[in-house]
Amino acid sequence: MRHWKVVAAGEGGQGVQAMAETLALAAYRAGLNALYIPNFGIEQRGGVSLALVQVSERAIGAPKFRTASLVVALSPRSLERTAGYLGPETVILYDSSLVDAPRISDRVVGLQSYDTIAPEAFAERISYHDQRMPVRAAGRGMVALPASDLARQRLHPRVFNMIILGAVVSLTGVVELGAVKGALEEKLNRRFRQDPQLKEHNFQALELGYARIKETMAV
Amino acid sequence: MEKAVRKERRVFMTGNEVVAWAALAAGAVHMFGYPITPQNEIMHYWRRLAPEYGRGFLQTEDELSAGFTAIGAIIAGKAAFSATAGPGTILFQEPLSMAEMMRLPLVLVVQQRGGPSTATVIYSQQEVTLACFGGNGEGMRLVYSTASHQELYDYTIKAFHHAWSYRFPTLVLGDGYQAKMREALIIYDPAERGWEAIPAEPILGPERIQGGGRPLLHLRNAFSVEEELAEVLREHLDDFARAAPELVEYEFTGEPGAEILVAAHGIVGRAARAAVEELRAEGRPVNFFRAITLRPFPEEALLEALRISGGAMLVVESAVGQFGRMARLAVAGEPLRSFKTLYRPGVGIAAEEIKEAVLA
């Protein structure tokens, strides 16, 4: 198994920390080495929330790293914030209901997509006016998932982060989905007992995210 | 007093939680504290857990008070401690100095944040000088720099024992990353690893009264004659020097003929170890040294490591030379082939950067 270095970023309240912590807990429960660290600067009181998770069969070194193997970006600002973690091998999972895929249009290079680093001047902010921003990243793999739309339409807006987590599990294969459900139950034990529907929604969200990625990857 | 940890078990928690559990497991009886990020949760966890195990907590009006109330409890024979960070560590210098002068086993956990002044609430290794030499004295303190949650647990327990055995104030020097990150560790009952109860006893009190059975103790932190002070300090300094060989701890891996020695402490030591392992896997012979005690400093071990490494050293830390100065001093007089530094004040260091610095 590879050493997974995951950076997850989203707006405060999107549940980035809960998602990252659950992933790390699931990996720990599965007997792997896991390290989770929130970025807990002043931004915890508003703005982009950033979480770093590493999972490996081997001992984990520093809590922070330079290049991520997976970046999870849940808002346009988050994508900007995580730009420094991108390397040629980095896979980017983004919420396509909030973030636009990149499109670079200029006379020299023509219409291009993800794989080219776009000089900023070339990048056309296609949907600037409706607050959507193009991805300007250099990652090799771009994986889109309209998680917020799915959560809103199919389940509950609150479980949006669990759709993303299901997708992360599907993409990385670090743990079984069952381990994540177990971790979630451990974390939210009391709340799940008070509100059985919350548990159902969370589990459905995990499965939905997981299945969506499996379908996408199969194509 | 009820045991907090009976059965050995693997847990996954934040470093602040680890410290609270370690202090409980060690048998600490009271915490005095004043909130400051990133150590707050040590207080929070301790305050929540302490009543369950018959321990006490008091939030004081500031760090000076936290230090002196802890000293009061310690003089009464209670294993008391506190935790702080950043500007709080500055305020703690006064009680720490008093503890040095009067040989009081004050235990303090420091979760370093960015400095100087308020700076960041996040992380740094900029409190090394403060931790080691912050007082108006000679730095007669034990300072443990931890690199993992397991070490936070192990050395917090050790800090209480060594503070009370050697009677020097003892610091566990963590940082904001260690405070806030979650990783696995084994928690255990210290008695099962050979740690009996903390050897705490009343330092002043009725049994010290003439005829009370124990020798009289003249506990002072004020002297009217220079020579009198010098005489007392000489004793303390001799005690410190005598204890040093028993106390120094470090980690070294390497072989003769290496191209360079990478030296670090604390969480940066982890990045350094990872970088060294990667370099070795790529066929580069690189040695690795991590100081665990910063006071007393493992001078001889570092010198020996440097000799094995052909006199070339790279010092890495999230500060500008606070650790580097101690390392440089430890090898003073030794011909150096090269002395390189990777100093990142208040910023985390990734293994990749250290690799680049070695190869540069």
Image: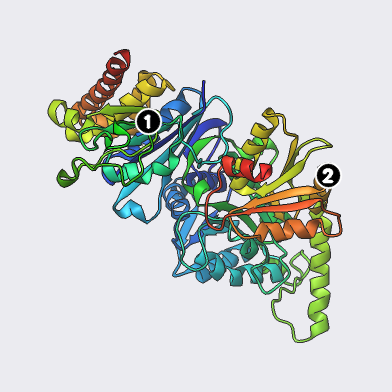
Q: Compared with residue B296, is residue B304 higher up or lower down, i.e. above or below?
A: above
Q: In which quadrant is the C terminus of chain A drawn?
A: top left
Q: Observer-nearest residue: B311 or A11?
A: B311
> Does residue A191 appear in this view?
no
User: Is disc 1 surrounded by few (<14), some (14 to 19) or many (20+) residues within 10 Å?
Assistant: some
Residue A47 appears left or right of B330: left
Identify the secondary structure beneath mark 2.
loop
Q: Mark 1 belongs to which amino acid?
A: Asp
Residue A150 in picture, x, y percent from top left: 18, 28
To which quarter of the image does residue B283 belong? Answer: top right
Residue A93 appears left or right of B257: left
Q: Which residue is mark 2?
A: B310
Q: Observer-nearest residue: A135 or B322?
A: A135
To which quarter of the image does residue B320 belong? Answer: bottom right
Q: Which residue is mark 1?
A: A115
Say which residue appears at 80% left-offset and 44% top-offset: B305
Q: Chain of mark 2?
A: B
User: Residue extending furthest front?
Assistant: A108
> Does residue B9 appear in this view?
yes
Residue B105 in picture, x, y percent from top left: 66, 60
Q: Nearer the viewer, mark 1 or mark 2?
A: 1
Q: Chain of mark 1?
A: A
